[in-house]
């Protein structure tokens, strides 16, 4: 039996470089598990922080050690890919954040006409851009917190315009509120603000990360998540809940062991869990996602209200990440999950491939 050669693509140029390596290590282990070892051959490809692609021994070394390597002294040619790329039958990109889950790498993989795991260009871009995502959710009729979309030009405008902008945010959203760059993942650049001074500082900081910014009204709620798996007929997992002691679920809390607790399944009324699962599938369709996604919600227990927060079309994929854990509790093991994602990618490519 000929093995399918899976190009495991990890690292990348975003702030989630190290998280990507951890996800890739877990996926490589799953591909090497007994039920998958006879079906798949792993071809690792490591993208350095400067964008230089590494294959062969260097990529394998990073995968084995889990440690990022320093940029090479040579000037990278970002369009000169390792010759091993021509041997790949299917790509498994596990690049979190910008240049990884925002449609850019998906566009490249689409151009070379090789199947790949996950959403295409549109689904990835919509899932990454918080403003575009919320617009799609609104069109689908999914309830959300109040928000306001801004641009860097508005924030870094003249001294007469900026105060009026802050006045409008205070009157429409109030405090506390959250200021976020529109296109960064893993809580990078996000701030919770409770005063005019904090708002002004947070807007300036967010504008340094992205030219598009979103401000959301704060809400007192439980944070719950649901995983989705599939293409045109996706399935929703059991619902999980995140708890933490910090002020909000920031980058440090998310990736520091012991700072957050996961409850799977979430202790929720059955009707609420079913409603969250239904909304997760609606969100998946709204942004045209494919393969996998994790959808995050706010559950306002006092009123029974469920508000969609965001969708992540390439969630963390370590053995302790919420996405694979949700499926494990739904009856799909980590090795089986990776196998299913590869088969879904092949299915999607066979349908989309133009007929000659």
Image (tube, rainbow, N blue to C red):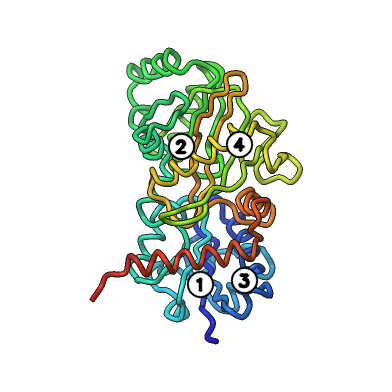
Q: Position of residue 185 (x, y in %)?
A: 51, 45
CA separation in Å, label 3 and label 1: 11 Å
Residue that badge 3 annotates: 31
The Cα atoms of the two marked residues, 3 and 2, are separated by 35 Å
Marks 3 and 4, how far apart at CA? 29 Å
Tell whether label 4 touches label 3 (CB within 8 Å): no
- Mark 2 residue crowding within 10 angstroms, few (<14) / some (14–19) / many (20+): many
Of badges 4 and 1, nearer the viewer stands 4
Helix, strand or loop at label 3? It is: helix
When asked about the image quadrant of residue 57, the answer is: bottom right
The residue lying toward the viewer, choosing from 86 and 293, is 293
Closer to viewer: mark 3 or mark 1: 3
Q: Earlier in the sequence, mark 4 or mark 2?
A: 2
Is residue 291 depicted above or below 172 in this figure?
A: below
Q: Are marks 4 and 1 in contact (CB under 8 Å)?
A: no
Query: Which residue is disc 2 drawn over?
Result: 181
Res 7 label: 1
Residue annotated with mark 4: 224
Mark 4 Cα shell of 10 Å, populated few (<14), some (14-19), many (≥20): many
Helix, strand or loop status at disc 1: strand
Front residue of 316/308: it is 308
Which residue lies most toward the front here?
271
Other-residue count near label 3 (Cα within 10 Å), few / some / many at <14 / 14–19 / ≥20: many
Disc on the earlier residue, 4 or 1: 1
Residue at figure coordinates x 43%, y 41% from the top left: 282
Mark 1 neighbour density, 10 Å: few (under 14) some (14–19) many (20 or more): many
Residue 38, picture quadrant: bottom right
Camera-near label (3 vs 2) is 3
Q: Nearer the viewer, mark 4 or mark 2?
A: 4
């Amino acid at each position: 039996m000929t093995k399918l050669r899976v190009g495991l693509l990890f690292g990348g140029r975003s702030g989630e470089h190290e998280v990507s390596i951890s996800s890739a290590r877990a996926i490589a282990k799953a591909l090497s598990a007994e039920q998958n070892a006879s079906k798949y051959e792993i071809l690792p490809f490591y993208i350095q922080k400067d964008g230089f692609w590494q294959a062969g021994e260097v990529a394998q070394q990073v995968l084995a050690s889990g440690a990022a390597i320093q940029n090479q002294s040579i000037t990278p040619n970002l369009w000169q890919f390792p010759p091993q790329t021509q041997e790949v039958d299917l790509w498994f990109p596990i690049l979190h954040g910008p240049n990884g889950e925002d449609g850019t790498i998906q566009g490249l993989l689409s151009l070379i006409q090789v199947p790949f795991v996950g959403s295409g260009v549109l689904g990835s871009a919509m899932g990454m851009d918080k403003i575009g995502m919320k617009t799609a959710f609104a069109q689908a009729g999914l309830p959300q917190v109040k928000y306001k979309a801004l641009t860097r030009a508005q924030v870094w405008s003249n001294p007469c315009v900026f105060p009026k902008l802050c006045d409008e945010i205070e009157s429409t959203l109030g405090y506390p509120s959250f200021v976020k760059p529109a296109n960064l993942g893993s809580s990078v650049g996000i701030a919770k603000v409770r005063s005019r001074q904090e708002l002004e500082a947070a807007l300036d900081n967010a504008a340094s990360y992205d030219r598009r910014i979103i401000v959301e009204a704060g809400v007192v709620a439980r944070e719950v998540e649901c995983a989705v798996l599939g293409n045109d007929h996706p399935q929703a997992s059991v619902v999980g809940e995140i708890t933490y002691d910090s002020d909000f679920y920031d980058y440090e809390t998310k990736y520091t062991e012991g700072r957050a607790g996961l409850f799977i399944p979430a202790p929720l009324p059955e009707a609420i869990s079913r409603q969250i699962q239904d909304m997760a599938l609606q969100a998946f369709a709204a942004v045209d996602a494919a393969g996998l996604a994790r959808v995050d919600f706010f559950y306002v227990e006092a009123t029974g209200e469920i508000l969609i927060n965001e969708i992540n079309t390439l969630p963390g994929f370590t053995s302790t990440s919420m996405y694979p854990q949700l499926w494990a509790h739904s009856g799909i093991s980590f090795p089986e999950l990776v196998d299913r994602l590869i088969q879904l990618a092949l299915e999607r490519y066979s349908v989309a491939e133009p007929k000659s």
